[in-house]
């Protein structure tokens, strides 16, 4: 594999069965926010967690220099030889068709079967309504993002594929989460128009609704849902949606908690088909408009790292990172997107200062 390998292990001198985490910083602000996550990995290692980090160079720069997006041998090694991926962002104006982004990020999501994309929106930024607590469960591998379609003069077709196994996995995860949290569950759909694809979603949803009588669950047309969300976000708990609607709804929900810079996400394969079954990444993209300026907010990346820690069973570390973020924000630490002046690095340092030793 074309990568640097760093083994972090303190407290326990050998690296028997370390958790192998691949780092793909990617493009634009991806490497800038990833630079703030790396010390958190060193911090968990300093607490005795055995991890091994693989730094991977894939992204626009590497593609333009070599023509490589994500080589098959590297993908195979990630799938079978790693436990988790920490991802920055991909997307670069020099590659307007986004080919490299498709072949890196969409391939990882699809070929690792990372069906469930979890996007929690919990306010930590002072001034935002702290009673909002929305969690979006977005199907991550299908729908109109399956990249199948055709273009010809005057006509273009994008296919949207929905399969029962993926829909069922996503909805089952959403029902389980709603049951655990005691929240309601809304399925966002447009089955009145998208009769085939969203009709399948509704059928599976009805089946699971009868199996989870403890969860107050109902479907809503996505357009009406957006209006209701803006009117009263506090009325919502868990929202499940296909890939496309989930993408839109979660970006809207980001506005309730401080914007694109502060929202995390975690994707996983509940059926665990491969060794590597989880990927953490911020909700935001590569933000070319602010890349290289040191303005990016690292909070979304750090909260994604916390979600990964929790997924790995490192609850104390996950909670500590989340508390450090919250405390730094409450103490007034802010990047420009939040109306402050801190650089990405200064914001990362302010947060890390709150981590227990
Ligand atoms: P993608 O489709 O890849 O998710 P996008 O088109 O949604 O990307 P982003 O890259 O997420 O776009 O950027 C949207 C806006 O949010 C931009 O104006 C960008 O500057 C801002 N933004 C995104 N991430 C951050 C961040 N971490 N800190 C500050 N501003 C950000």
Image (cartoon, rainbow, N blue to C red):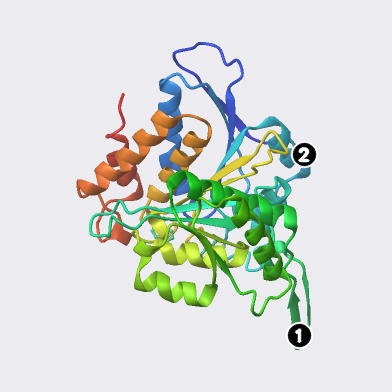
**Quarter of the picture holding the N terminus:** top right
Instruction: Give the residue pinned by disc 1.
Output: 155
At a point 38% along the width and 61% down the height, the residue shown is 259
- Few, some or many C-alpha atoms within 10 Å of disc 2 (few <14, some 14-19, many ≥20)? few
Residue 338, how many percent across, how many down? 29, 59
Quick check: can you spot residue 59?
A: no
Instruction: Give the residue pinned by disc 2.
Output: 73
Q: Earlier in the sequence, mark 2 or mark 1?
A: 2
Q: Residue furthest left?
A: 331
Above or below, comparing residue 117 to residue 319 in the picture: below
Residue 174, how many percent across, how many down? 55, 52
The disc placed on residue 130 is: none
Quick check: can you spot residue 118?
A: yes
Find numbered disc 1 in the image and state the secondary structure of the residue it sits on.
strand
Describe residue 24's horizontal placement relative to residue 167 as left or right: left
Q: Tell us which disc is closer to us: 2 or 1.
A: 1
Q: Residue furthest bottom?
A: 154
Residue 41, how many percent across, how many down? 46, 31
Q: Is mark 1 within 8 Å of ligand 1?
A: no
At a point 41% along the width and 44% down the height, the residue shown is 303
Above or below, comparing residue 248 to residue 312 in the picture: below
- Which residue occupies the foreground of this view, 270 or 125? 270
- Which residue occupies the foreground of this view, 217 or 230? 217
Residue 71, how many percent across, how many down? 74, 45
């Amino acid at each position: 594999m074309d990568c640097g390998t760093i083994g972090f292990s303190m407290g326990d001198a050998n690296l028997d069965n370390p958790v192998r985490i691949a780092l793909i910083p990617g493009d634009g602000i991806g490497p800038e926010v990833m630079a703030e996550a790396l010390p958190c990995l060193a911090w968990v290692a300093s607490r005795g967690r055995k991890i091994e980090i693989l730094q991977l160079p894939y992204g626009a720069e590497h593609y333009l220099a070599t023509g490589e997006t994500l080589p098959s041998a590297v993908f195979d090694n990630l799938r079978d030889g790693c436990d988790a991926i920490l991802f920055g962002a991909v997307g670069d104006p020099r590659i307007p068709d986004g080919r490299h982004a498709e072949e890196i990020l969409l391939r990882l999501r699809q070929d690792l079967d990372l069906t469930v994309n979890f996007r929690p929106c919990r306010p930590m930024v002072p001034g935002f309504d702290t009673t909002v607590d929305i969690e979006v469960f977005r199907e991550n591998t299908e729908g109109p993002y399956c990249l199948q379609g055709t273009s010809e003069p005057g006509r273009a077709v994008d296919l949207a594929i929905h399969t029962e196994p993926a829909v069922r996995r996503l909805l089952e995860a959403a029902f389980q989460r709603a049951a655990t949290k005691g929240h309601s569950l809304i399925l966002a759909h447009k089955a009145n128009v998208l009769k085939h694809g969203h009709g399948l979603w509704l059928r599976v949803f009805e089946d699971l609704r009868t199996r989870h009588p403890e969860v107050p669950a109902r479907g809503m047309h996505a357009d009406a849902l957006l209006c209701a969300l803006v009117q009263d976000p506090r009325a919502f708990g868990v929202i499940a949606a296909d890939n496309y609607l989930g993408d839109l709804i979660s970006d809207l929900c980001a506005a309730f908690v401080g914007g694109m810079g502060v929202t995390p996400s975690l994707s996983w394969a509940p059926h665990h088909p491969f060794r590597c079954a989880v990927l953490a990444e911020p909700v935001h993209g590569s933000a070319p408009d602010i890349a290289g300026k040191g303005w990016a907010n690292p909070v979304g990346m750090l909260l994604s790292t916390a979600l990964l820690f929790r997924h790995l069973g490192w609850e104390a570390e996950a909670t500590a990172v989340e508390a450090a973020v919250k405390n730094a924000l409450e103490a007034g630490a802010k990047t420009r997107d939040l109306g402050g002046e801190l650089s990405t690095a200064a914001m990362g340092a302010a947060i890390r200062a709150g981590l227990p030793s």
